[in-house]
Image: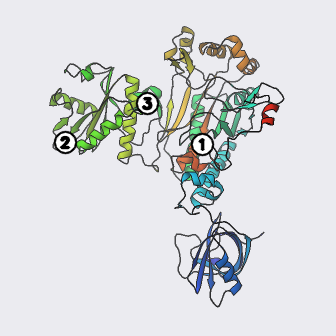
Amino acid sequence: MLRSHTCGELRPENLGQSVVLSGWIQRIRDKGGMIWVDLRDRYGITQLLLEEGKTPKNVVQQVRNAGRECVVQAFGTVVERVSKNPNLATGEIEVRLENLELLNPAKLPPFLIEDETDGGDDLRMKYRYLDLRRDIVRKNLELRHSVARFTRQYLDGLNFIEVETPVLIKSTPEGARDFVVPSRMNPGEFYALPQSPQTFKQLLMVAGFDRYYQIVKCFRDEDLRADRQPEFTQIDCEMSFVEQEDVLSTFEGLIRNLFRNVKEIELPEIPRMTYADAMRKYGSDKPDIRFGMEFVELKGAEQDLTSGKDFAVFDGVALVAAINVPGAAGYTRKQVDELTEWVKRPQIGAKGLVYVRVNEDGTIKSSVDKFYSEESLRSWATACGAAAGDLILVLCGEPDKTRKQLSELRLEMGKRLGLRKPDDYKVLWVVDFPLLEYGEEEQRWFAMHHPFTSPKPEDIELLAAGDLGKIRANAYDLVINGVEVGGGSVRIYRKDLQKTMFTVLGFSEEEAQAQFGFLMNAFEYGAPPHAGIAFGFDRLCSLLGGVDSIRDFIAFPKNNSGRDVMIDSPAPIAEGQLKELGILVR
């Protein structure tokens, strides 16, 4: 070993000991007669002390010749630090340097290797191996390690078995685009990289493994954003002889266990909400319930408080919906106008915004006073539960689009009012999703989750009757602070029902057999009832770390163009390789 202790280990009880430390020089402060060196490794920082007349001259000269990020071995004695640093774990001691061994010199790094670095995202991604030396990035990866460790401990304790499934599989037409891999030994044929181990974990249930899990790499060739990467990691799980309630109970336990061990937070029992209620109240299947502002339908299926007042904008639409923003009646006209422009942006797509102020003195002022009496506006305020000092914001239009627009406005107001705090965790199960959704462009039905999701038992007859839009899936999502973290379902395990599902999704019998014949055949050999779930591991880590971007919790992430700028990938390959793979060279 080139060290007796790590740079985060020494404490006052080590005073007087001769020690050997190894690491990187983070900073040198040379005051002439005194020199201090911050020596860093993965475990922390220890201050080295050099004093004129006490430290050998050759050691002083070595330090003065060294630069930031040089790799050194330091020999010395632990002494009490005169000016203690309470922000440093080793802040009560320092090491009086007696000898220094330069293990490897270093070029001056392109950015500061400190928490408050001067390097931008692109530069730090290019030199990711240097960025990983920063304490803040290292702690993110340590959190990731802890989440994986506690996940394994919890699932191992419930008799789950970790099984690796193949990475080279078959491409399927459902879901996102596959990454494909040409086969040299089978010219003109391709493997696909798995978007999930879905069919393999179902086959493991047929094989009698009963409880499976895997922390597994998955791949999707889709457009990127802060919480999406072309390769990502899932906590993938499946159970036999269970119903939905068993899955929710088991994995609610996992999430509460992770919060307890990683964040020292005791979560309450996780509430549940149907998909229909989530869309009606929040306009989203992953609602952020850290704050209120539930939707109120001023004109909808149950009431109409807006029609017949000669306001054509409201008279000509199916839905008029509002949110009540507590304490925002003091918004100026300029602020309201800015909000109006915000909802008109192409990303939101609203045509305008109506507001109603409930002033502190009890009077009501709105942007539609010309059409609505104070009595009418008070009926709106009553419906919204608005009190003095509140601001009601109203959108209207086609129901699905309007709910989506109002959902975005609600989230924006929550952000502006500081109600979406990253350290305030609200967890929710969303259940009873639609089984199918209709694609207007393709003029056919698609599986909302995947084609192996079972309908609710009481809705199976609707499948046979062709009443496809009303069928609910035996499916569930876990949502944390408005982010979908996991999702799963009770699976179809009977061949006849799976064949019916493939027919509804537009597969011919030949196509279904070609794509999924192996699974259909397996169902003939005694498939048990089974269900499962998968959690986005990177996304879960970023939420536990209080950060929006999952890139900070991946050791070597891709950028927003799907490129690894550090190794310059993807990249062209040699013409000879292309010919060997049977791929045409232009």
Mark 3: few, some, or many residues within 10 Å (few <14, many ≥20)? Answer: some
Q: Secondary structure at mark 2?
A: loop
- Measured along the vertical axis of the image, is residue 12 above or below residue 229? below
Question: Separation of disc 3 and disc 1 at Cα?
Answer: 24 Å
Mark 1 against mark 2, which lies toward the viewer? 2
Residue 576 x/y as whole percent: 81, 36
Determine the residue positioned at 40% across, 32% down. 346
Who is closer to the viewer here, 371 or 27? 27
Q: Earlier in the sequence, mark 2 or mark 3?
A: 3
Type of the residue with mark 2: Asn
Q: Check whether the beta carbons of the residues at disc 2 and disc 3 lie within 8 A of each other.
A: no
Type of the residue with mark 3: Ala
Q: Is residue 563 left or right of residue 87?
A: right
Reading the image, the residue beneath label 3 is 278
Determine the residue positioned at 15% across, 43% down. 361
Q: Secondary structure at mark 1?
A: helix
Q: Check whether the beta carbons of the residues at disc 3 and disc 1 lie within 8 A of each other.
A: no
Q: Check whether the beta carbons of the residues at disc 1 and disc 2 lie within 8 A of each other.
A: no
Say the numbered circle drawn on residue 254. 1
Q: Earlier in the sequence, mark 3 or mark 1?
A: 1
- Res. 16 in view: no
Reading the image, the residue beneath label 2 is 359
Q: Is residue 496 left or right of residue 412?
A: right
Who is closer to the viewer here, 535 or 222? 222
Mark 2: few, some, or many residues within 10 Å (few <14, many ≥20)? Answer: some
- Res. 342 in view: yes
Determine the residue positioned at 42% across, 39% down. 289
